Amino acid sequence: MADGLLVSSVNYSSSQTSAAPINRLQMGGYDADFVSPISPDYLCPICQLAFRDPVQTRDCGHRFCESCLEPILRKPPAFCPIDRRTLTREKVGAISLSISVSNCISLVVVFVLITYFQRQYHQDLILVLIARDKRL
């Protein structure tokens, strides 16, 4: 992960470009307009935005943006902002997406199988109808 980003801004009144370093650790969550409202389960309790690089505490299970929790972990003793349990870097981990990925793969497999069987059913139905028409 990069410690800093370089953002270029343009002053339209003077047409000058200035470059200002922005520390990625100060960015917080995603401040975006979503198509549908976001469940509170996906909002960081620190920045109140959609999670960016979410991490979860191992003891209490609370989730935060990595960049929101980082300043807290840098200054020992660190405490969970929700329940004040003691935190260390060893007690915080990235949230695994493997469950979501496996669920998506399962859904795709089910969709493919349903599509295949629907197609097979329709082909069989068409063959039955053609055979019936030939007998008439």
Image (tube, grey):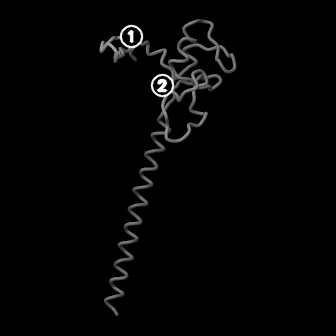
Left or right: 77, with 124 as reference point = right
Q: Secondary structure at mark 1?
A: strand
Q: Is residue 48 above or below residue 36?
A: above
Specify which label sits upstream in the sequence, 2 or 1.
1
Q: In the rendered structure, which amino acid carries the disc numbered 2?
A: Asp
What mark, if any, has residue 34 been given in the picture?
none
Identify the residue position indicated by label 1 in the image: 21
In space, the residues marked 2 and 1 are separated at their CA atoms by 20 Å
| Quarter of the figure that contains the N terminus | top left
Left or right: 97, with 123 as reference point = right
Q: In the rendered structure, which amino acid carries the disc numbered 1?
A: Pro
Residue drawn at (49%, 41%) of the image = 35
Identify the residue position indicated by label 2 in the image: 53
Residue 50 percent location from the top left of the image = 53, 29
Residue at the far top: name it.
Answer: 76
Q: Secondary structure at mark 2?
A: loop
Residue 101 percent location from the top left of the image = 45, 39
Residue 136 percent location from the top left of the image = 34, 93
Residue drawn at (60%, 6%) of the image = 76
Residue drawn at (69%, 20%) of the image = 83
Q: Residue 45's image quarter?
A: top right
Left or right: 128, with 77 as reference point = left
